[in-house]
Image (cartoon, rainbow, N blue to C red):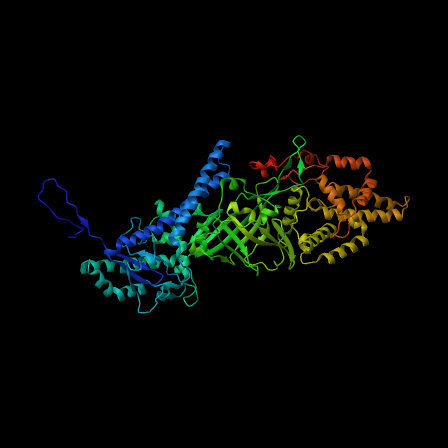
């Protein structure tokens, strides 16, 4: 017979007797130190109270984060059918963001002072439960987390070996063909080693026979199941290597605490040890900022994330054009120019506190150090539905680009934690007339040669080590939960895609100088681009070469074979459309000089001379048909020089064009060129009918175009 409660009886008919249930002691296994933990009945309430606090604050924060993320996704994916629905959705998102901030503050207070480095302040325990799961899953419940400073007097631990500081890796055995595996035989021997001490303490509240039965079930059932679940999911090379058993290190425990909280709170956690180790946490995906997918290998305390930042639909880039005045009001109006969407695509594996901070802090910060090592971490930042809904950054707003990164308060446990050398991915842009994103620069864990790259615009492009390097400044994205800066590089694989992205940026900005390129980098890019046109090769063939060398090669190629030069331009299609104004200006000046030489050797009766003159005219017409806007044509004239680092006297170039084409043809060109960008459309020759039909911003780049209405200053 088992006594579960005791109470005082009386003789009064119909009366109720209050019976006090005798509290049971609690038994846990602590993987980090390989010991059995016993919590006696008198300490049970205080111990469970702290476990409840830790689980509650973490779970509430993760779920608040997931709720805000879901509403943010709804807002950005236009799941509100009307403007009133959208306003209501924005209101709900603002409220959810406030709840998230409040939940984060509670977690910050609860975890304040926890130090992950020694790994002893947030304690992770597995209940030694032996009840059979109805699904036949491994025995054991979810992890329990307590703060050592709160419960240090509420328990007693019994080490499974005689070592001063036993570790789980001391219970490994090397098996041929399988490598190192946790040996349940050794674990069971360890339990027998402490059996006497555990029986002695628990004998105060339980009978010896009952204790013997429970310990036998732990030895025969729980230990083998734990070893099997661990071996199926943990990954390590050998116990001799440092960090091989980091699965139960301090920061790994924090990651498991955060990753497992939401599922446990919502009741959708199956309770199995195997599920915990495998990361079967349905709610986790919704909790990951900017996610596309998230797989958590909890046995290793590592999270593998695929992130699109600040959102998978991208960040809209806007440009500030030259100011204009309204004719009626006389006020200065700024019509921000839509320049397309970009996003950061990351695949990264982050350990412990970094993974937890990405789940918890509500924002992401990316930085790189002096050696070019990229780092990522969670970063608390204030956000609003209005900022999220706009999802934009003005690329040439110097004040915004220099802005501080906003809120800096971090949860103490994550302070200073960042993933180094694991950041990998790409800078992507939304292609014209499409929802598709394409890579135009690679993000590597470490990118050398970044010293000195960094201007006042959103992007800074340098040229070192035979590759172009981009530094993307994210200060203007703070309200979107993204801050810092990240580096990417353009090699042979992406140089053409990069050229297309940059060209569309310039065209969308009204052909103004965006100040993206550093001077040396732009000269090199212009020279290699021009060489690619003249020689008919791919851009990648010229990576690693310098501007001066390529400019001299161009001069010799054109001087020695003018006919081939003219033919190369006339046979260029997309590559000429994607050329910048200074490349076209260089080609224009070379045509002018060829024509000048022809005029000096004028012989109208020479068939070859007449054919060359005709070729120059046709080549000039083909070149000018690739101009998209009136402002671009003016820039072509300004860059009609054989020196990529200088500007020219426009009068000389304009006179040449006028004499070659005639006033009527020049007027027709000016009449058909666009006065303003039509962003998002494919670039086309201005002689095509489809070019004339392009109007406003293409629908693919025109999601809820709030910027279409000018703001007054």
Q: Is residue 284 left or right of residue 521?
A: left
Residue 102 place in picture, x, y as percent: 41, 45
Q: Is residue 148 above or below residue 683?
A: below
- Number of disc labels: 0
Of residues 448 and 537, the one drawn nearer to the viewer in this rendering: 448
Residue 330 place in picture, x, y as percent: 66, 33
Q: Residue at x 36, y 44 (%)?
A: 266
Q: Residue furthest left?
A: 11
Q: Is residue 512 left or right of residue 153?
A: right
The answer to whether residue 468 shows anywhere in this view is yes
Query: Which quadrant of the view contains residue 624?
Result: top right
Residue 137 place in picture, x, y as percent: 32, 51
Q: Residue at x 44, y 43 (%)?
A: 98
The answer to whether residue 25 shows anywhere in this view is no
Of residues 496 and 255, the one drawn nearer to the viewer in this rendering: 255
Q: Is residue 46 left or right of residue 98?
A: left
Residue 568 place in picture, x, y as percent: 75, 48
Q: Residue at x 31, y 48 (%)?
A: 135
């Amino acid at each position: 017979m088992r006594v579960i409660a005791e109470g005082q009886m009386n003789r009064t008919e119909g009366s109720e007797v209050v019976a006090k249930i005798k509290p049971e002691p609690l038994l846990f296994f602590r993987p980090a130190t390989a010991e059995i933990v016993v919590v006696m009945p008198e300490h049970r309430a205080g111990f469970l109270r702290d476990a409840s606090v830790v689980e509650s604050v973490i779970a509430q924060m993760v779920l608040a984060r997931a709720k805000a993320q879901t509403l943010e996704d709804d807002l950005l994916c236009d799941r509100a059918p009307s403007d009133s629905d959208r306003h209501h959705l924005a209101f709900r998102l603002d409220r959810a963001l406030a709840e998230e901030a409040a939940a984060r503050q509670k977690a910050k207070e609860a975890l304040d002072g926890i130090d992950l480095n020694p790994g002893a302040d947030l304690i992770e325990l597995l209940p030694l439960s032996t009840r059979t799961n109805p699904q036949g899953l491994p025995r054991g419940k979810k992890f329990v987390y307590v703060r050592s400073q709160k419960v240090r007097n509420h328990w007693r631990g019994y080490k499974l070996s005689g070592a001063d500081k036993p570790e789980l890796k001391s219970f490994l055995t090397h098996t041929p063909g399988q490598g190192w595996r946790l040996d349940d035989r050794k674990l069971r021997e360890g339990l027998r080693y402490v059996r006497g001490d555990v029986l002695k303490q628990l004998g105060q509240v339980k009978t010896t026979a009952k204790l013997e039965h429970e310990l036998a079930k732990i030895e025969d059932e729980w230990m083998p199941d734990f070893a099997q679940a661990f071996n199926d999911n943990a990954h390590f090379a050998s116990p001799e290597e440092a960090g091989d058993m980091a699965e139960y290190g301090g920061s790994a425990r924090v990651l498991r605490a955060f990753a497992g909280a939401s599922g446990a709170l919502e009741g959708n956690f199956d309770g199995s040890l195997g599920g915990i180790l495998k990361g079967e946490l349905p709610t986790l995906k919704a909790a990951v900022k900017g996610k596309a997918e998230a797989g958590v290998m909890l046995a290793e305390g590592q999270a593998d994330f695929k992130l699109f930042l600040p959102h998978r639909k991208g960040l809209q880039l806007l440009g500030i054009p030259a100011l204009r005045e309204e004719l009626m009001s006389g006020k200065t109006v700024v019509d921000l120019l839509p320049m397309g969407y970009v996003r950061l695509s990351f695949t990264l594996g982050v350990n412990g506190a970094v993974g937890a901070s990405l789940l918890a802090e509500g924002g992401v910060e990316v930085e790189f150090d002096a050696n070019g090592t990229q780092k990522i971490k969670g970063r608390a930042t204030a956000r609003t539905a209005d900022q999220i809904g706009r999802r934009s950054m003005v690329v040439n707003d110097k004040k915004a680009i220099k802005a501080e990164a906003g809120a800096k308060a971090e949860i103490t446990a994550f302070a200073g934690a960042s993933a180094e050398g694991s950041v990998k991915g790409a800078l992507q842009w939304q292609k014209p007339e499409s929802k598709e994103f394409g890579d135009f620069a690679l993000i590597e864990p470490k990118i050398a040669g970044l010293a000195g790259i960094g201007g006042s615009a959103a992007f800074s492009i340098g040229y070192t080590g035979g590759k172009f390097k981009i530094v993307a400044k994210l200060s203007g994205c703070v309200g979107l939960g993204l801050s810092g800066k990240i580096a990417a590089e353009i090699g042979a694989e992406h140089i053409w895609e990069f050229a297309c992205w940059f060209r569309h940026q310039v065209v969308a900005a009204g052909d103004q100088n965006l100040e993206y390129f550093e001077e040396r980098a732009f000269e090199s890019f212009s020279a290699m681009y021009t060489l690619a046109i003249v020689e008919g090769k791919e851009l990648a063939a010229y990576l690693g070469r310098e501007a001066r060398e390529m400019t001299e090669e161009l001069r010799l190629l054109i001087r020695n074979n003018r006919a081939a030069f003219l033919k190369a331009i006339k046979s260029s299609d997309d590559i000429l459309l994607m050329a910048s104004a200074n490349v076209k200006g260089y080609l224009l000046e070379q045509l002018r000089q060829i024509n000048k030489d022809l005029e000096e050797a004028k012989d109208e009766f020479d068939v070859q001379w007449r054919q060359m003159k005709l070729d120059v005219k046709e080549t000039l017409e083909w070149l000018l048909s690739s101009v998209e806007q009136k402002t671009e044509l003016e820039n072509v004239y300004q860059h009609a020089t054989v020196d990529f680092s200088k500007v020219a006297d426009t009068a000389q170039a304009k006179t040449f064009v006028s004499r070659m084409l005639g006033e009527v043809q020049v007027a027709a060109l000016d009449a058909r060129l666009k006065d303003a960008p039509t962003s998002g459309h494919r670039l086309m020759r201005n002689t095509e009918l489809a070019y004339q039909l392009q109007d406003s911003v293409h629908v693919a780049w025109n999601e809820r175009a709030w910027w279409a209405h000018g703001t007054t200053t």
